[in-house]
Amino acid sequence: MRTDLHHGCRLFAPSNIPVGLFILLFTILAAQACADDKINAKEVRDSINRGMKFLLDEQNEDGSFPISSPQHRGGVTALCTLALLNAGVDAKSPSLAKAIQVVSAIPEEHLTTYTASLRVMVLCLADPKSHRQQIASDEKWLEKIQIQDGPSTGGWGYGNDLVETAADASNSQFAILALHEARQIGLPVTDQVWQRAKIYWENMYEAKSGGFFYRPNIRQDPYGSMTCAGISSLIIIEENLIDPRDAVSPEGNIVLCRGARKIDKVSKAIDWLAKHFSVQRNPEQDVMTKFYYLYGLERAGRISGRRFFGEYDWYRLGAAHLIKTQKDASGAWQGAGGLGEESEIIATSFALLFLSKGRRPIVVGKYQHADAVADWDMHPQGVHYLIRQTELQWNMKLNWQTINGRKATVDDLHEAPVLFISGRDRLDLSPEQKKNLKAYLDSGGFIFAEAAQGDGCGENVEFDRKFRELVAELLPGNQLEQLPESHPIWNSHFKLLPNNNRPLLGVQASCRTSLVYCPRNLAGLWELNQPNWMSKYPENAKREIDYVTQLGINVLAYATGRQLNEKLDTPHVLADKKGGPTSRLIHVPKLDHGGGADDAPNAWRNMLTRFEFDMQMPVDKQKIMVRPELAELQKYPLLFMHGRMSFQFNDAQRADLKKYLDGGGFLFVDCICASKNFADSVRREFKTIYPATDLQPMGADHPCWTDQFYGYDLRQVTLHTPDINPDGTATTRDRKTHPVFEMLQLENGRPVLMFSPYDLSCAMENAAASQCTGYAKDDASKIAVNVVLFALQSAESAVSEPSQK
């Protein structure tokens, strides 16, 4: 069932701050000992590393992997090699280079469907350019042995006999996977192969239940691994049967929206899988093929873009089960006896394929806001193809998923750093959906939207009007405006120019543009970007498709900074704690001034939320702005101040600030987006207030950057610096450093002000890397936690609590 990732031990807060702080800090150790028993990305990484080590330790000196049956030696070596490649072992490492050489050298007379298919997948992943000839040879061999008549038409058997007449879904799915990989590197696979394969898989389907059989002429009940195979195979076949040239005329005119495609058999098979879901066994069969089934489950979930089958979060549940059943001593997995999984090498390979392929970072979530596909997913392959092109550009494996907007929590939305919203006729959201979308934006999410309009999809569509109304409701006071040529989105990956035919509109909210909208088709053109067809389009159509694809990649680069969380490392919006006397709350207001004192309105609240969650101290996160006047200042032991413009206090305000700081107060100051104007004003104003004292740099060994006060060890954090490549595209230079802060101390040595000239606020407002010199988001939040802890213990008890006034 769906579960929350975060929970913890709750502690009672003290009634006095900062006097009672030290008592509470001792109890924090107990809170930190309350282990979160939910699975996380580190556990998955550790499990993968242990499994990788086991396989590499088992490898023979010649690069092969041992197996009891010599005739399966090549196929098992290919399976192990595929698992290690997906788990992250470099294809050029000595161990993998030897294994790939063994796989490449398998003679044709030893080929089976499994072996040839696995070899294609290995070589396409390792180095498709160098191995293109071998891949092409195996592709032709697989085409040749496809069964072309009889009950098994369109399927594959074991491939030991070229006149084989009996096929099965297991061999057939591996052949489909291999042919699809060959197609992706530009090798021709004839349409007849896909058409026959479609006949086969439709014959394997049981309409009554929605499941898939193992063989068409053996009508045993459907079961899990074959239903997973049917889901992924039909999706792949449908993709390869589409001729995108149907949407492009000989003159290069693009005509889309000829009816959204939906594969009914896939939808019903997904329902079957939800009904029979398990990760402990192969549903409706047995435990002897559990690992083989999990590999199929990963593929069905990933290719269909599903996080859930029904209420089951398939990757989290499967990963938790695998980690629990992994052998402590060796790092291997072992299945029940029979059907090969009693071999630790085979079981471990399937387990690694599930864990490593399923954890690929999610970059886009397709927001399902309606029931009918035509209302929210007119071009269902568009995002999928965009992610495929993004993978090539960023040189990393990525994924996408569908998010049901009517069921999703804010945390569910944050599974994806970018939400893609599309439509033509409908956009009817409930108040709860709107609330969640606003919270998603406020906590760093990014919305990328399009209207399925133009290019044959109609004009003046209803979605356009409703989306503009939604923007006004989610971001009141902000306007959708066309992004100028100077906007960083135009050079975030490719160097592009705005195109009035497909304009980008955006909303600048706080530190960045958090919403981008195109009132014309984008996904429909992404869907036309298939490697086998691009060279066949007229030049004008090709240019348009290339431009729109590059535009999509630029938006993703801008929104994410190309810094993505692993699956299970998704940021979470921490809920406010409710109840309890207000006298127990820590109050940390913001100092008002004329330099943009509230220009990043959600940043400080996000910092305080992180502090409250980590330290288990109740914090008042309602926005309180205080003027630099002693009557207001003296209520609080700690103030936060940030801005991005020049400002100036008057003499009375300077005098009151001095009395506040001299009397035990503390000021935490941050430059929004590393603003030089704001930084210069801070240094000037506090030099005026304390003429004999300068702001001094804080070194890496300062106690604030250690865990001395039960915070974090921050002696090494990541500092992002935006830069421009020689070709004019944007980049970010990262360096490891301690937090770069300046401190103001009184003559008695007591610190009264800590100042960050580099950005914390934009990082805390946004999930993506800041577009200015500043810290990574996680580091920024940890820095804030440490500064607050340090400030509270530094503030003198002479400053009274609000409750004592």
Image (spheres, helix red, strand yellow):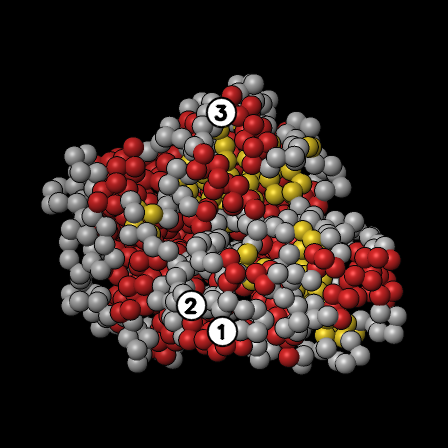
- Helix, strand or loop at mark 2: loop
- Which of these two is toward me, 668 or 20? 20
Q: Residue at x 66, y 71 (%)?
A: 798
- Between tags 3 and 2, which lies in front? 2
- Residue 132, above or below 687: above
Q: Are marks 2 and 1 in contact (CB under 8 Å)?
A: yes
Q: What x and y, as percent, mark residue 408?
A: 40, 43
Q: Which residue is mark 2?
A: 11
Q: Residue at x 31, y 58 (%)?
A: 317
Q: Quadrant of residue 642?
A: bottom right
Disc 3 crowd rating (10 Å Cα; few below 14, some 14-19, many 20+) is many
Compared across the picture, whether 282 is left or right of 32 comes to left
What distance separates the C-alpha of mark 2 from that of mark 1?
A: 9 Å
What residue type is disc 2 on?
Leu
Q: Quadrant of residue 699?
A: bottom right
Q: Of marks 2 and 1, which one's residue comes earlier in the chain?
A: 2
Name the disc covering residue 24, or none: 1
- Helix, strand or loop at mark 3: loop
Q: Please, which residue is most extreme toward the front here?
A: 805
- Which of these two is toward me, 688 or 683? 688
What residue type is disc 1 on?
Leu
- Which of these two is toward me, 93 or 610? 610
Q: Which residue is mark 3?
A: 424
Q: What x and y, as percent, mark residue 559?
A: 60, 47
